[in-house]
Image (cartoon, helix red, strand yellow):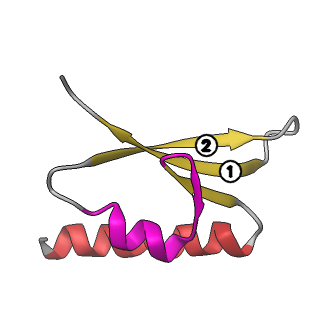
């Protein structure tokens, strides 16, 4: 991983931790998870994950769902 990628991922990790502390639920492939688990398992050269931000009726983010993207 390049220094730039590490720096960007560090920012992602920090943001996910902040969301988690604010009560936003995190999911990885449909399973409840933590920011630490996402950090350890979403960085893989062969796998791509896409976040989906789920909001409540007021537009406040209540869930972030990371789902594996596959190409056929």
Residue 46 painted magenta: no
Q: Which element is circle 1 on?
A: strand
Q: Which residue is mark 2?
A: 53
Quarter holding the C terminus is: top left
For image coordinates 68% across by 50% down, the residue present is: 63
Q: Nearer the viewer, residue 70 or 3?
A: 70
Q: State how far apart marks 2 and 1 are (Cα).
A: 6 Å
Quarter holding the N terminus is: bottom left
Q: How far across and how far down the image is residue 22, in percent?
A: 75, 70
Q: How far across and how far down the image is residue 65, in percent?
A: 56, 47
Q: Which residue is mark 1?
A: 63
Tell me, for residue 14, which label it has, or none.
none
Give the residues in magenta.
29-43
Q: Residues within 10 Å of mark 2 (few under 14, many from 20)?
A: some
Q: Earlier in the sequence, mark 2 or mark 1?
A: 2
Q: How far across and how far down the image is residue 53, in percent?
A: 61, 43
């Amino acid at each position: 991983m390049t220094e730039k990628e590490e720096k960007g991922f560090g920012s992602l990790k920090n943001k996910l931790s902040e969301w988690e502390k604010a009560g936003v639920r995190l999911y990885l492939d449909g399973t409840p998870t933590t920011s630490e688990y996402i950090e350890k398992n979403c960085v893989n050269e062969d796998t791509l994950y896409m976040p989906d931000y789920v909001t409540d009726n007021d537009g406040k983010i209540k869930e972030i769902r990371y789902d594996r993207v596959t190409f056929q």
